[in-house]
Structures are given as structure tokens and as C-alpha cells.
Amino acid sequence: MASFVELAVEAESSIINLTELKRVDSELNKTAVSREENDERGKYGTTTYIRRFGSWFNALGKAGLEKTRTPMNLPEEDLFQNLEEIWIKLGRQPRYAEVQKPLSKYHVGTYENRFGTWRKALEKFVAYINNEERTSSEEAIRNVEVEPSTFHKTKRGINWRLRFIVMRRDNFKCKNCGRSPATDPTIILHVDHIKAWANGGETVLENLQTLCSKCNIGKSDLE
Ligand SMILES: [Zn+2]
């Protein structure tokens, strides 16, 4: 049986190893370190961790890192779409402590695991959105050829990124009645073609507006 002194030494070197594992992890800017990555960058070999903790997964778990065998491959798109939904509900950028159930489908920790920090997750999201913004204006589609089958340059469907851009421009409020989910949780916002698609309206920023479901239904009746 191990003496007290040996146990203390054991515990101490475990801490050192885990600190080192976390260092490799933050260097890689993600939360799961693979064996290969560790062998390449880490001070201690993977076998050292396996000897110490029984398995590579145990070592990751002890270090508080995401284990590579747990689903890491939740699509980025899903994480961003969830972010979009809570942003719309709040009418502003979500705060760290707000990113949890029931408001958010995924906990803020999931974002940290994927992107390194919450701040980086937000930056990635904004960059993703801005990319869409550049391709969704009248100017951007000016020289696009008209699709002969529909006489349109754009698709009818409004993807979630464009929806977000329109709502952000409209301050997450209905353009008609001014109501917003941030002050009235029963309000659901939609993005609507100003000039109807059926009448040749394109799916571009300039031809889109935010309406609440009540005003949107009222408008459809008139069309
Ligand atoms: Zn309205």
C-alpha cells in the first residue's frame, strides 16, 4: 500500500500534468485535445496520462476538458442558429449568464468548448452573419442572371442568417406595430417580402421587413 508521502507526490504530479494538458488545450483553442495533438505539443506523452489516469478519456475528464468521444460534432450551424433565436427573443446580444435553458437550447459551456470562449463564439457568429450580409443586397445581385423558370435572381426562402440581418436592422421589432418579443414574449417575429415574391419581389435586404405574426397575417389577407 502506498504511503502518505507517495500519495501526496502522486497528487501533485497529477495536478502538474493536468495543468499542462489544459495548456496544450488552450494553445489549440479548443476543448478536446486528441492524443496526436498532445504528443505533438504537450510536455508529457499521451502514455504518461494513460498510466496516471487509466485512460486518455479519464485524463481529459479530470482536467475538465471535453472528452473526444462525447459528441463534439454538433454542427456549428446549429449553435449559431440557437444563438440567433435567443438574440431575437432578447432583442439584443445575449449575455453570458443568459445562455442556458430554457432560453437557450445549449448551455454557454457548449459554446466555450467549441470556440474557446463565449466572446470568440460571438465573434464567429457575427463574422458568419456579415458574410451573408454582403451577398444579400440589391447591389450584390445586380449582375446575377435571372433564373428563366421563376424570373427571379434570388430564392424565395429567407435563410436564418438573412432573417437575423433584417431583424437586427429593424431593431427586433415589428415594423408595423412596433411590438417585440423582448417586451412581450407572446410576440413572434417574421420576415416578410415587401414586394411579394409572386409579384417579382426579390429576397434581398431592401425588399424584406420584420413583422409580428399578427401584422403579417393581416398583410397576407390584403395580397
Ligand atoms: Zn405587428
Image (cartoon, helix red, strand yellow):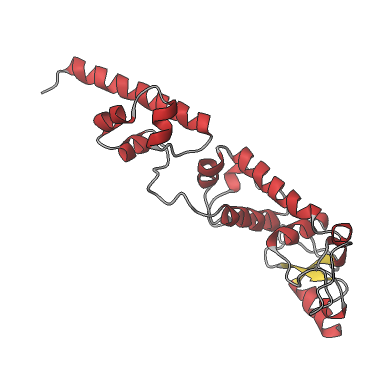
Residue 50 left/right relative to 212: left
Quarter of the figure with the N terminus: top left
Q: Residue at x 76, y 70 (%)?
A: 155
Residue 172 seen from this side: no
Q: Residue at x 57, y 57 (%)?
A: 78
Relative height, residue 146 to residue 122 (above, below): below
Residue 21, percent from left and from top: 41, 28
Q: How many marks?
A: 0
Residue 123 left/right relative to 194: left
Front-most of residues 144 and 87: 144
| Displayed quadrant of residue 13 | top left
Quarter of the figure with the C terminus: bottom right
Front-most of residues 54 and 182: 54
Residue 219 left/right relative to 164: right
Relative height, residue 175 to residue 5 (above, below): below
Q: Residue at x 83, y 61 (%)?
A: 205
Q: Residue at x 54, y 41 (%)?
A: 112
Residue 69 left/right relative to 216: left
Residue 106, percent from left and from top: 53, 53
Residue 2, percent from left and from top: 14, 21
Residue 10, percent from left and from top: 25, 21
